[in-house]
Image (cartoon, grey):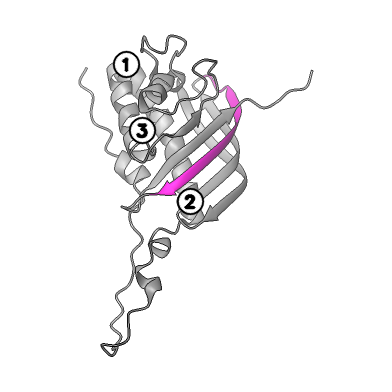
Amino acid sequence: MTHKPLRLLPALFLTGAVALGACATAQSPATPAPAALASPAVVGQITEAEVLAAQQAWGKALVQISTDFETGGIDAAKATAEAVLDSAYGYNLGPVLFKPTLTTAPQTFRTTRDGALAYFVGHDADFPSDKGFALNRWRGFATENAAIFIDGDVAMSMGKVRLTNADGTVIEVDKTWGYKKDDAGNLRIVLHHSSLPYTPE
């Protein structure tokens, strides 16, 4: 079956640069332009709305990978997962601090793109324990943030994520995301920590 490219990914993940209005203010040649207008901290400022949008985009992408697997097989799911990693995660910026929910030593932490891809879709001999978390017939996604921290072009969020599969079963995980806005104005996930809620014996 021919897999159709996921056209929504750029709209889901690439937030775009912040638009700055042009200011036509007359100045004498000896007066420099205000530094704040050209400051990367201003251009790269992350908003809470962008963080919330990125969270929802991540959930929609997870569901998309799952449904693509059902309709197009592993090749379709892998193509979608690769597009998600390239548009949403910051592997182009350096190592991503990714600790998935269900990983064990010595492959607990996935700082490379290959490790993240294997976690999402499995089918990688270098990561034999990975079954493909994103292939579990996911149908719904919801977040409940405990708090969101924003400092310039870096933001972090922590809270609950609830995933619903095709059977109606809801899985709850504790999740922390860290974001950095890149030079193009796109929000990138640079930290992703997920774990099951602690249940005392």
Q: Quadrant of residue 9?
A: top left
CA distance separating discs 2 and 3: 19 Å
Horizontal and vertical percent position of residue 45: 44, 59
Residue at 32% across, 35% down: 86
Q: What is the chief secondary structure element of the magenta stretch? A: strand
Q: Is residue 138 left or right of residue 39?
A: right
| Pointer 1 with pointer 2, Cβ within 8 A | no
Q: Quadrant of the C terminus?
A: top right
Is 183 covered by the magenta stretch?
Answer: no
The three-letter amino acid code for the residue at tag 3 is: Leu
**Label 1 belongs to which residue?**
74
Residue type, mark 1 in image:
Ile
Image x and y of residue 114, in percent: 36, 23
- Dot 3 or dot 1, earlier in sequence: 1
Of marks 2 and 3, the one in the foreground: 2
Q: Quick one: 139 or 121, which is closer to the camera?
A: 121
Closest to the observer, 170 or 53 = 53
Q: Which residues are magenta?
A: 167-181
- Label located before the other in sequence (2 or 3): 3
Q: Amino acid at mark 2?
A: Val
Q: Image quadrant of residue 6?
A: top left
Q: CA distance from mark 1 to mark 2?
A: 34 Å
SS class, disc 3: helix
Q: Nearer the viewer, mark 3 or mark 1?
A: 3
Badge 2 marks a residue whose secondary structure is strand
- Could you tell me residue 148's position as x and y percent? 58, 49
Residue lying at 33% horizontally and 79% vertically, measured from the top left: 33
The residue that mark 2 highlights is 154
Where residue 176 sits: x, y (%)? 56, 38
Q: Which residue is mark 3?
A: 85
In the image, is 11 to the left or to the right of 158?
left
Front residue of this view, candidates 54 and 63:
54
